[in-house]
Image (cartoon, coloured by chain):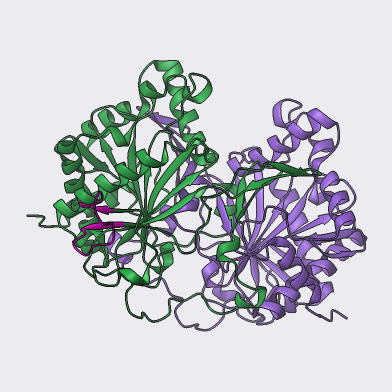
Chain colours: A purple, B green
Amino acid sequence: MPELRKDPIIGRWVIIATERARRPDQFSAPAEGPAEGECPFCQGSEEHTPPAILTYPNSTHDRNKLDWKVRVIPSIKPMLKIEGDLGRSGLGIYDMMNGIGAHEVVIETPEHINNIADLSIEQIDNVLDVYIHRITDLSRDNRFKYVLVFKNHGWVAGGGRIKHSRSQLVATPATPKRVKEELAGARRYFDYRERCIFCDLIKQELESKDRLIIDIDGFLAIVPFASRFPFEIWVLPKKHACDFIALDGSSRKDLAKILKIVLLKLKIGLGDPPFNYIIHNAPFRRPKVGYWKTIEEDYHWHIEIMPRLTRVAGFEWGTGFYICPLPPEDAAKFLREVKVEVG
Amino acid sequence: MPELRKDPIIGRWVIIATERARRPDQFSAPAEGPAEGECPFCQGSEEHTPPAILTYPNSTHDRNKLDWKVRVIPSIKPMLKIEGDLGRSGLGIYDMMNGIGAHEVVIETPEHINNIADLSIEQIDNVLDVYIHRITDLSRDNRFKYVLVFKNHGWVAGGGRIKHSRSQLVATPATPKRVKEELAGARRYFDYRERCIFCDLIKQELESKDRLIIDIDGFLAIVPFASRFPFEIWVLPKKHACDFIALDGSSRKDLAKILKIVLLKLKIGLGDPPFNYIIHNAPFRRPKVGYWKTIEEDYHWHIEIMPRLTRVAGFEWGTGFYICPLPPEDAAKFLREVKVEVG
């Protein structure tokens, strides 16, 4: 059973991931990506993975039949386990709980394609639909507070050795610290101005255009003013909404299109760099107090894409200050000028 | 001039480091360490670096004469610049200020030695003395709120291509977010118990011994209960003190010894892994309000060492949850058993 432990000073939770445990002497090997074997994620190799949780589009029939477009499986090295209770306990000054949660892998294509940017808009739309389906399903489990959807592309970004496009969902028993910080920041602004900070940010970026990459079909992509990473990209819906999962079918397809455009710009412009993306979504359990009081009005879901072209060093760990060696305006100009065709 | 920009939602500051700027098309090269040329940090190559800010032990005479033991120079790619004023300004919803600060490099030895663990205890003591000297000097500049001392060892940990042991000092115009979080956490505990949380932690770790690596000469080294990284190590003074710079000569030498022991254990046990260390010290400007009110009683300086054997991926960036694939108790046992000789 993985164990969640809380740092008594900072209050940061850490997952001691027993399912991913290595022996102490196994850490001295260099952390380079080993060569790739046969791909267990391709169509026809379903028996090499655990049984599917969901297949798209035929989820109501045999989940493991071979004509799937998107397939969701439990992680074989889960950071959190689905069975059990939270078992909160203490040990002197320390607090811990069982590592309860869900950890799923979304296989984004039956074909052996490495980068989601190379999937069709229709296929990316299918992937987004699956995200929404799985978040909705996991939100019914009362033990969970949040579902994080993210992608690790490339070895440096935490991607695995197998070059088959996939993303991950993790349901956590506590609202993560970073999510709370974002909610609290949006709340603070709303308290003062009675406006959504993201809506104001969108208005300002559309007027100045300095950091705008693209503005299309109700979505925009910008390089954020205080980028942590060179070529960091935020994709935001122009229409205010706190829930990603409330997206309608037509808007979801528009989102698939802008995602394909910006991810293809990254791939072509920068030679397929490693990146992470994260869907910043409102938590689904929202008592009408604290951060959650005005969340429908003050929070605005969006996607953050973080290319991993620089190394995070002692200074960032020690301070929480990030160092970005590229002015965001230059990054936006560069990305605007990368030509892509999305059909 | 580097620019400090504040994320309007989270409140996180980012340094847009113009002195380290690269053109957008220079980011697509793979981020591997290139081959090493002639070392500018060795004795006899002083003309290849900027003039020294301090040399030890002969700082009052010619700072660039050749018989130095430790040498401090300004960074040639400073993340912050020493000249100018803070120039706080706004742009719509955004806030920024000039990137004012100091960025210095401490060359830890005149010899071409890569790992500080291979320096003598006397030499590490000299390095610590230089840290104290430079923090004290920078604290006199009213524009600065904090001085961070840190080391990036190895390419993955943000170290440079030249394999000559050195560390860095950065003076910042704002108290960093992570530092504030730690101060606030210590304050919260003190408010409730009227005891220092670090003193309680030390007591508990000395009693349980499960995570203890070594207990010697007034210092202890532990693997923290909620380690973010496998083999993370904290070195703490048993005697309560919030100021690292108040360390007396005899304790400083004891610190040099325990540092050498644990860094040598890391090097030998894990094959010279990349790591960062950071001195967690109290800020030097302390109005008697807020976090600072009881800081002499509630904060406890220490050093955190973070081996970089795992990759930080989307999940950590998105949540602030860390995943550690090695139980801290196993890491401590492994490090206890690595035999080292320090003379």
**Residue B255: horizontal and vertical position, in percent?**
21, 43
Residue at the far front in the pictured view: B61
**Residue A322: horizontal and vertical position, in percent?**
56, 53
Q: Does the segment drawn in magenta span residue B325?
A: no
Q: Is residue A5 above or below residue A40?
A: above
Please state if B174 lies on the left or on the right of A214 as rendered: left
| Number of numbered callouts drawn | 0
Q: Is residue A19 above or below residue B27?
A: above
**Residue B104: horizontal and vertical position, in percent?**
41, 54
**Residue appearing at x 72%, y 36% in the figure:** A285
**Residue B7: horizontal and vertical position, in percent?**
68, 46
**Residue appearing at x 76%, y 77% in the figure:** A119
- Decide which of B139, A120 is in the foreground and name it: B139
Snapshot quadrant of residue A95: top left
Q: Does the segment drawn in magenta span residue B64?
A: yes
- Decide which of B286, A26 is in the foreground and name it: B286
Please state if B103 lies on the left or on the right of B27 as rendered: left
- Decide which of A5, A39 is in the foreground and name it: A5
Give the magenta part as a residue range. Answer: B55-71
Q: Is residue B150 visible?
A: yes
Please state if A256 lies on the left or on the right of B4 as rendered: right
Q: Main secondary structure of the magenta part?
A: loop
Assign the C terminus of chain A to one quadrant of the image: bottom right
Q: Is residue A10 visible?
A: no
Residue at the far left in the pictured view: B343
- Decide which of A195, A5 is in the foreground and name it: A195
Snapshot quadrant of residue B48: bottom left
Snapshot quadrant of residue A178: top right
Please state if B342 lies on the left or on the right of A270 as rendered: left
